[in-house]
Image: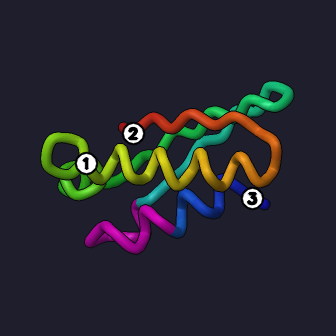
Amino acid sequence: MDLKQVLTDIARAIVDTPDAVNVIEKVDGDNVELTLIVAEDDTGMVIGRHGKIAKAIRQVMKAAANTCGKHVTVEIK
């Protein structure tokens, strides 16, 4: 499973400008670090009120990573 593509698809479904979504992936063994970059106006949509949407995105990504036997961290910029 391509975790980078999963995060990209989730973010594009949330934001107003899906073309501005970019995900940077760093892999170190079983650890995957994903950095989500969105347009400045869309940052609030991805984070949500009190970080609820960001927390939900992280939970979905951790569940997806568990199916692959990997550990994922998601950072939003």
Direction from residue 45 to residue 75 in the image, left or right: right
What residue is disc 3 on? 2
Amino acid, disc 1: Lys
Vertical arrangement, residue 19 with respect to residue 20, above or below = below
Quadrant for residue 27, please give it: top right
The 10 Å Cα crowd at callout 1, few under 14, some 14 to 19, many 20 or more, is: few
Asked if residue 40 shows in the view, the reply is no
Q: Which residues are magenta?
A: 10-20
Q: How is the image coloured?
A: rainbow
Number of numbered discs overlaid on the protein picture: 3
Marks 2/3: CA–CA distance: 18 Å
Q: Earlier along the polypeptide chain: callout 2 or callout 3?
A: 3
Q: Nearer the viewer, residue 41 or 6?
A: 6
What residue is disc 1 on? 52
> Residue at the spot x=72%, y=47% of the render?
66
What residue is disc 2 on? 76
Q: Earlier along the polypeptide chain: callout 1 or callout 3?
A: 3
Which quadrant holds the C terminus? top left
Q: Secondary structure at mark 3?
A: loop
Q: Earlier along the polypeptide chain: callout 1 or callout 2?
A: 1
Q: Secondary structure at mark 1?
A: helix
Is-magenta flag for residue 42? no
> Mark 1, mark 2: which one is toward the viewer?
1
